[in-house]
Image (cartoon, grey):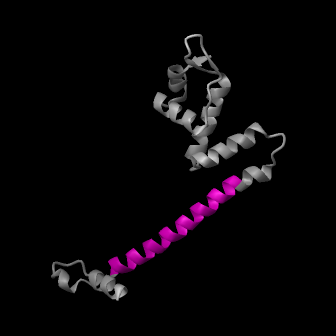
Amino acid sequence: MYKIGELAKLSGLTVETLRFYERKGLLVPSARGENLYRMYSKQDLARLRFIQRAKQAGLSIKDILELLTLREHAETASCNDVSNVVGQKLAKVQQQLAELKAFETTLKTLHDACCGGEESARSCSILKALDDAIE
């Protein structure tokens, strides 16, 4: 069993992060010592590593909680249930990428139309295009 500081070291996370995960329901101490210290098991360390990998994949706390629940009930949950969680996140990312691509195209068009010279900004094509777009 590990105390919270030991678990933090082993996982590469801070004690504050572990406490945050506890508040969010991602991590629950396996036991409390006689001194009421939080105590964690090797399974808790494995759970933390799962959480870290899920965060690296861009999943939210809500998504991770859902995946942890599915993981804990793997006998009754389906692979489709798990796939849906990741699929919803993928759809959001794809939408964000499309929006960013549209922003990139607009900014590139504005930038390419500008002479970028030392002339007065009064004649700047970027400012004119943005003024015209507003009207």
Residue 98 sits above or below residue 1 on the image: below
Residue at the outermost top position: 34
Measuring 58% from the left and 45% from the top, which residue is drawn there? 61
Of the 4 image quadrants, the one containing the N terminus is top right
Q: Residue 135 falls in which quadrant of the image? A: bottom left
Residue 88 position in % (x across, y down): 66, 59
Residue 23 at x, y = what percent? 55, 35
The mark tally for this picture is: 0
Magenta stretch holds residue 95: yes
Task: Determine if the magenta segment contains residue 21.
Answer: no
x, y percent for residue 38 = 57, 20
Question: Main SS of the magenta segment?
Answer: helix
Residue 21: x and y, percent? 55, 36
Residue occupying the point 38% across, 75% down: 107
Q: What stretch is highlighted in magenta?
A: 85-112
Please say if 54 is above or below 40.
Answer: below
Q: Which image quarter: residue 122? A: bottom left
Name the residue at 54% across, 29% down: 11
Residue located farthest toward the right when viewing the structure as drawn: 76
Q: Could you tell whether 82 is left or right of 13 in the image?
A: right
Q: Quadrant of residue 119?
A: bottom left
**Which residue is drawn at the image coordinates 63% and 44% (left, top)?**
64
Left or right: 62 in relation to 18: right
In terms of depth relative to the viewer, which is nearer, 30 or 97?
Answer: 30
Query: Is 22 positioned to the left or the right of 103 in the image?
Result: right
